[in-house]
């Protein structure tokens, strides 16, 4: 990892910041990104104080011009790009039929289109150095989940993108990977969308929450080992096996717990 250049989207706080920190600890020069320049600067200053080499680019990855500028600035600053972690993402809790189309659009844009825009521009640079193209998905991307339908389906779409790109770039030496992360302790700044598209605090208490640094370390280990898939947590691994081989059983278990899920996820 020494002297490699890593870009992590959505890294002013939360999981993205810890992935960037973990990469920096291993000797990477890091590019951090988010929309809010003040929060981003705070993280960049904190990284510099820790002795990390960091460049901060305020950009909204859902805008293709911003995605292009993000890669251009990274290349101008460091001259190469070895690792791209498509981390920026937001969740939506709600009943599908009550969800505003505008809220749906925002989820698709940040989790999916944004990752596509940044990856497309980064790809030639990553291939040149036989680098790493990584997507951050979720356990919600293994099997469709009620009241998370928009988020779940968009994270599932990332699987197909990662699989396609892995085949399309075969023979170039590029590593493509996708990490299915379990419910993680929320950064105090974390917000998710509700059905109306309003930003709210994430409903808690549904699952055991993983500490953010643990999640970040596992993602970085996956990059180091050039693995294609990371499924985080024992419950995630069980869910993965069941979703692949017994999807009917997973649907049955979710149906049985529907009322409880609705209460805990939507407070209804
Ligand atoms: N937290 C969990 O339990 C969990 C579980 C499974 C998977 N994941 C996935 O892990 C990833 C990170 O989750 P998280 O919980 O750490 O998220 P988070 O706490 O909400 O952090 C999101 C980061 O992304 C930035 N961001 C949001 N929209 C952006 C945009 N359009 N362009 C650029 N940056 C943007 C935010 O800063 P600004 O607002 O300033 O832009 C912030 O730095 C996501 O892909 C999420 O789906 C999370």
Image (cartoon, rainbow, N blue to C red):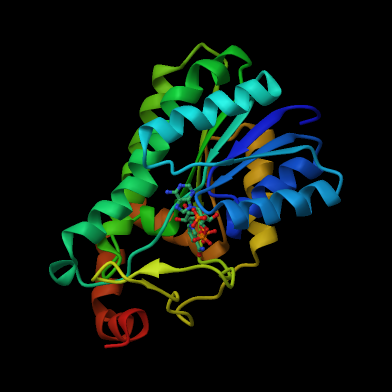
Instruction: Name the image quarter holding residue 68.
Output: top left
Camera sees residue 162: no
Residue 196, percent from left and from top? 23, 71
Residue 204, percent from left and from top? 47, 80
Say which of 20 and 145 sits in front: 20
- Residue at figure coordinates x 13%, y 68% from the top left: 97
- Residue at figure coordinates x 45%, y 76% from the top left: 201
Q: Residue furthest front?
A: 38
Left of 207 or right of it: where is 113?
A: left
Residue 20, percent from left and from top? 67, 46
Camera sees residue 57: yes
Instruction: Name the image quarter holding residue 256.
Output: bottom left
Q: Considering the image in quadrants, where does the N terminus appear? A: top right
- Residue at figure coordinates x 53%, y 12% from the top left: 172
User: Against 177, is 20 above or below?
Assistant: below
Residue 248, percent from left and from top? 24, 61
Q: Considering the image in quadrants, where does the C terminus appear? A: bottom left
């Amino acid at each position: 990892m020494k002297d490699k250049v890593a870009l992590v989207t959505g890294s002013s706080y939360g999981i993205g910041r810890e992935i960037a920190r973990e990469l920096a600890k291993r000797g990477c020069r890091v590019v951090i990104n988010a929309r809010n320049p003040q929060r981003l600067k705070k993280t960049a200053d904190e990284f510099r104080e820790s002795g990390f080499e960091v460049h901060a680019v305020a950009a909204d990855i859902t805008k293709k011009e911003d995605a292009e500028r993000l890669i251009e600035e990274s290349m101008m600053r460091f001259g190469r790009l070895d690792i791209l972690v498509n981390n920026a993402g937001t969740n939506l809790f709600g009943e599908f039929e009550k969800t505003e189309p505008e809220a749906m659009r925002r989820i698709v844009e940040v989790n999916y289109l944004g990752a596509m825009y940044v990856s497309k521009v980064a790809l030639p640079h990553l291939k040149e150095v036989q680098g790493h193209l990584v997507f951050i998905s979720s356990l919600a991307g293994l099997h469709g989940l009620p009241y998370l339908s928009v988020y779940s389906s968009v994270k599932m779409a990332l699987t197909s993108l990662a699989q396609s790109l892995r085949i399309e770039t075969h023979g170039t030496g590029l590593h493509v990977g996708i990490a299915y992360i379990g419910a993680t302790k929320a950064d105090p700044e974390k917000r998710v969308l509700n059905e109306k598209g309003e930003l709210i605090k994430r409903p808690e208490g549904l699952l055991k929450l993983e500490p953010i640094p643990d999640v970040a370390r596992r993602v970085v280990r996956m990059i180091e080992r050039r693995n294609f898939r990371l499924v985080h947590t024992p419950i995630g691994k069980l869910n993965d096996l069941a979703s692949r081989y017994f999807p009917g059983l997973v649907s049955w278990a979710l149906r049985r717990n529907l009322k409880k899920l609705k209460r805990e996820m939507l407070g209804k």
